[in-house]
Amino acid sequence: MDPLIQVESLWKVYRTGEVELPALKGVSFSVARGEFVALMGPSGSGKSTLMHLLGCLDRPTRGRYLLEGVEIAGLKPNDLARIRNEKIGFVFQGFNLLARTTALENVELPMLYSSDPPTLHARARAALERVGLGDRLYHYPNQLSGGQQQRVAIARALVMRPPLMLADEPTGNLDTRTSVEIMSLFQELNEGGMTLLVVTHESDIAQYASRIIRFRDGEIQSDRPVERRANAKEALAVMTGENA
């Protein structure tokens, strides 16, 4: 399969005075287009550091990271910004929505410097409709539930039509049912061809991915396909009694 991500002997070392603290220690792996990968590990294991590197939010100390065959480490800041905007969608635990801005306007933000107003509105509306919020376009974040706010964040991540989505603890602030709803949406996006990498502490959430990479002390502890992958739509049906 065509690799979207290639990571080769990636190191990230933080320095505090004379002390070196390695967060990643020579990590190597690849992710094919269309994969859904969960990154797991205890706090301090290196998974969030890796997510920042993959998202072009930080640079490795040494090693190589290729996204769509392009080596990232040597790119200029403007090029990195363009890649973040066009190639990568970000979803975070805290939603990161602007409080005084409607759902539609929040989703339009990544396109402000690249599209004319009619295109902005049309694409943002389509992204919100795709995540089931076509009737919440003009609601503000405080008028939305936590799950709806995360859907707005996902729509914002989708609006530039990136090949890669990175999600850092996307269900961390949500209840069980809402978490499964978000994972159902992720599975649907993945079935449509989107490549997803999700950081999670929750083993039941990781089971919705097709592959789990476990980290410990800055190294990969295991990298295995999910043998009994959970189906989020089926789980929701059980929760709501629709299969009764």
Image: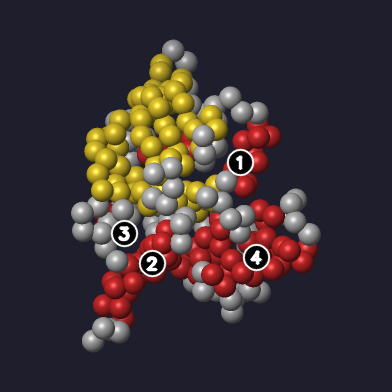
**Identity of the amino acid at label 2?**
Ser
| Direction from residue 33 to residue 228 in the image, left or right | left
Q: Which mark is residue 184?
A: 2
Mark carried by residue 239: none
Q: Quadrant of the N terminus?
A: top left
Image coordinates for residue 145, horizontal then vertical, percent: 49, 71
Residue 27 x/y as whole percent: 35, 29
- The disc, 2 or 3, on the residue closer to the chain's N-terminal end is 2
Q: Are marks 4 and 3 in contact (CB under 8 Å)?
A: no
Toward which corner of the image does residue 186 lie, by quadrant? Answer: bottom left
Tell me the CA gap for discs 4 and 3: 27 Å
Q: Which of the 4 quarters of the picture holds residue 224?
A: top left
Q: Which residue is mark 1?
A: 83
Q: Does residue 3 lie above or below 191 as drawn?
A: above
Residue 125 can be seen in this image: yes
Q: Element type at marker 2?
A: helix
Residues at marks 2 and 4, CA–CA distance in whole angstroms: 21 Å
- Distance, label 2 to label 3, CA atoms, is 8 Å
Residue that mark 4 sits on: 124
Query: Do callouts 1 and 4 mark residues in contact (Cβ within 8 Å)?
Result: no
Q: From this viewpoint, which residue is outermost toward the left?
A: 227
Of the numbered discs 1 and 4, the one sitting upstream in the chain is 1
Above or below: residue 110 compared with residue 44? below
Q: Which residue is mark 3?
A: 208
Q: Please, is residue 165 above or below residue 238 in the view?
A: above
- The three-letter amino acid code for the residue at tag 3 is Tyr
Identity of the residue drawn at 51% across and 34% down: 69
**Dot 1 lies on which element?**
helix
What residue do we see at 61% from left, 41% from top? 83
Q: How is the image coloured?
A: secondary structure
